[in-house]
Amino acid sequence: MDTGIYRVKPGEKRIDLGAWDTDDDGGLARDVADVESLKLTERIAQLQERLYAEGKRSVLVVLQAMDGAGKDSTIKSVFGPLNPQGLSLTSFKAPCGHERAHDFLWRVHAHTPSRGYIGLFNRSHYEDVLVVRVKNLVQESIWKKRYKHIVNFEELLVDEGTAVVKFYLHVSRDYQRERLQKRLDDPAKHWKFEPNDLTERALWKDYREAFEVAVAKTSTKDAPWYIIPAEKRWFRNWLVAKIMVETLESMDIQLPKPDFDPKSIVIK
Ligand code: AMP
Ligand code: MG
């Protein structure tokens, strides 16, 4: 399958998320996808080890979505099986006092993956043009310029050896209701529910519009956005894993050549 159909082409002013299916399964059967997902995850793990061994480049994965769309579960399913030693995960919350004392990228840059690592952003610098825009947390004259700064920032990362891939987990408003309701129904999930989630849910249209603009303005050839249909969770996992494999394979990662002759060494 060509995963390119889920990639947002560069140069759009705004995309229409309504035209992107939320429960697409790419024509795959679930049992086939589940088996393939296991293989894809193994392949990511192999490539992760090569990346670590090469020690020259890194991969940054950005995950954005509405509440309840499955960011946490995607992380667990697709990235959970990887070696924690070559993985860095950052979950971005609202910036605290000293973080707010700097430009919006300051705290983000500090968490980009070191060479050899896959870095995962659960939410990211995109919140600074999403929640910030929707809730007027800074003046429009400031957030308006951030798209350009984000594109330049990601270009810097790419130029210095970080592959950047961005996933938007796409779900419908009805699906979000179901997921939030589950958090209320299951006492073991109450901790995940925040009454504030409903305030955000009421702003669904505004968030969606903010996403449509942000994704269009910042999907570049080297730091593309993928819109992942996320209601069939098995397909979501398959697609994210598939794109991860493609991204890592396109890097043509090389194991370092030893600076000794292994054949000449005898271990007594
Ligand atoms: P959760 O992902 O459920 O733990 O929620 C994290 C919260 O942090 C969300 O409500 C985000 O909107 C908020 N958040 C993350 N980054 C920012 C940011 N840069 N500015 C304001 N709020 C943010
Ligand atoms: Mg939450």
Image: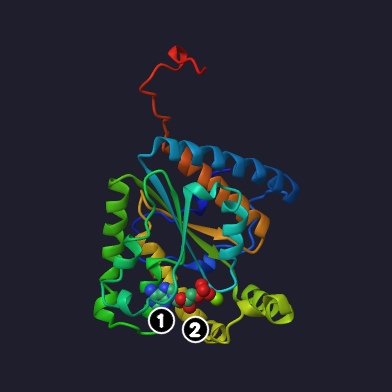
Q: Which mark is residue 134?
A: 1
The quarter of the rendered structure image containing the N terminus is top right
* Residue 252 x, y percent position in the rendering: 42, 33
Instruction: Give whichever of 144, 114 is nearer the camera.
Output: 114
Q: Earlier in the sequence, mark 1 or mark 2?
A: 1
- Crowding at dot 2, Cα within 10 Å, few <14 / some 14-19 / many 20+, comes out as some
Distance CA(mark 1)–CA(mark 2): 8 Å
The residue that appears at 35% across and 83% down in the rendered structure is 137
Residue kind at label 1, given as amino acid type: Val
Image quarter where ligand 2 lies:
bottom right
The residue that appears at 52% across and 47% down in the rendered structure is 243
Count all numbered tags in the image, as a single digit.
Answer: 2
Using residue 261 as the reference point, say whether residue 144 is left or right of it. Answer: left
* Residue 163 x, y percent position in the rendering: 39, 47
| Vertical order, 212 against 88 (above or below) | below
Residue kind at label 2, given as amino acid type: Leu
- Label 1: which secondary element: helix
Q: Which mark is residue 203?
A: 2
Q: Quadrant of residue 13?
A: bottom left
| Contact between labelled residues 2 and 1, with CB atoms less than 8 Å apart | yes
| Vertical order, 134 against 249 (above or below) | below
Using the rendered image of the protein, determine whether residue 105 is visible from the camera's viewpoint: no
| Vertical order, 224 against 50 (above or below) | below
Q: Residue furthest top?
A: 264
Instruction: Give whichever of 53, 249 is nearer the camera.
Output: 53
- Label 2: which secondary element: loop
* Residue 105 x, y percent position in the rendering: 30, 66
Q: Quadrant of residue 22?
A: bottom right
The residue that appears at 47% across and 36% down in the rendered structure is 50
Instruction: Give whichever of 217, 177 is nearer the camera.
Output: 177
Using residue 15 as the reference point, say whether residue 154 is left or right of it. Answer: left
